[in-house]
Image (spheres, rainbow, N blue to C red):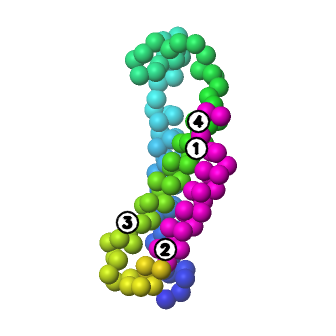
């Protein structure tokens, strides 16, 4: 089998997904109401009256903590298939996972050394 044949299903699925998104956006734009009233343009936040300016700056540390959480959380997802196939992968799979966890540990020690997880300085 050629590479084109192997990846054609993925390409077709990508085109269908893209077509669905574009079609949905066009239909919702054409079929949706166009009346803009002051009530519709008012800010709505979960039924709670909004207070102050929405552009209040947040500390960069908040975003750093969130990004680092997502980064290490996603890396744990890669460990699940390894754990499921642990016996079939054997020693080679174990060594590869040790290298993977070691790389994660080096990254974690680096961000601790840089103080990225210290909330107050």
Label 2 with label 3: CB-CB less than 8 Å: no
Residue 9: mark: none
Q: Residues within 10 Å of mark 4 (few under 14, many from 20)?
A: few
Residue at the spot 46% in from the left edge and 12% down from the top edge: 49
Residue 55 appearing in the image? yes
Whole-number angstrom distance, CA of label 1 to CA of label 2? 24 Å
Residue 36 appearing in the image? no
Residue at the spot 50% in from the left edge and 34% down from the top edge: 30
Residue 117: mark: 1
Residue at the spot 42% in from the left edge and 66% down from the top edge: 79
Please tell me which residue lies in front, 40 or 26. 40
The x, y position of residue 61, in whole percent, is 61, 37
Whole-number angstrom distance, CA of label 2 to CA of label 3? 14 Å
Label 1 with label 4: CB-CB less than 8 Å: yes
The local secondary structure at tag 4 comes to: loop
Bounds of the magenta segment: 96-121
Q: Residues within 10 Å of mark 2 (few under 14, many from 20)?
A: few
Q: Earlier in the sequence, mark 1 or mark 2?
A: 2
Main SS class of the magenta portion in the image = helix
The x, y position of residue 83, in whole percent, is 35, 71
Q: Residues within 10 Å of mark 1 (few under 14, many from 20)?
A: some
Residue at the spot 46% in from the left edge and 21% down from the top edge: 45
Q: Which residue is mark 2?
A: 98
The local secondary structure at tag 3 comes to: helix
The x, y position of residue 108, in whole percent, is 57, 56
Q: Is residue 68 above or below residue 86?
A: above
Q: Earlier in the sequence, mark 2 or mark 3?
A: 3
């Amino acid at each position: 089998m050629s590479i084109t044949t192997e990846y054609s299903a993925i390409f077709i699925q990508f085109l269908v997904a893209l077509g669905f998104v574009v079609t949905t956006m066009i239909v919702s734009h054409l079929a949706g109401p166009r009346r803009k009233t002051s009530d519709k343009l008012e800010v709505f936040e979960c039924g709670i009256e909004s207070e102050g300016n929405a552009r209040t700056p947040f500390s960069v540390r908040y975003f750093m903590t969130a990004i680092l959480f997502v980064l290490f959380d996603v890396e744990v997802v890669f460990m699940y298939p390894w754990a499921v196939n642990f016996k079939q992968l054997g020693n080679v799979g174990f060594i590869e996972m040790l290298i993977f966890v070691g790389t994660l540990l080096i990254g974690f020690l680096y961000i601790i050394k840089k103080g990225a997880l210290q909330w107050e300085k």
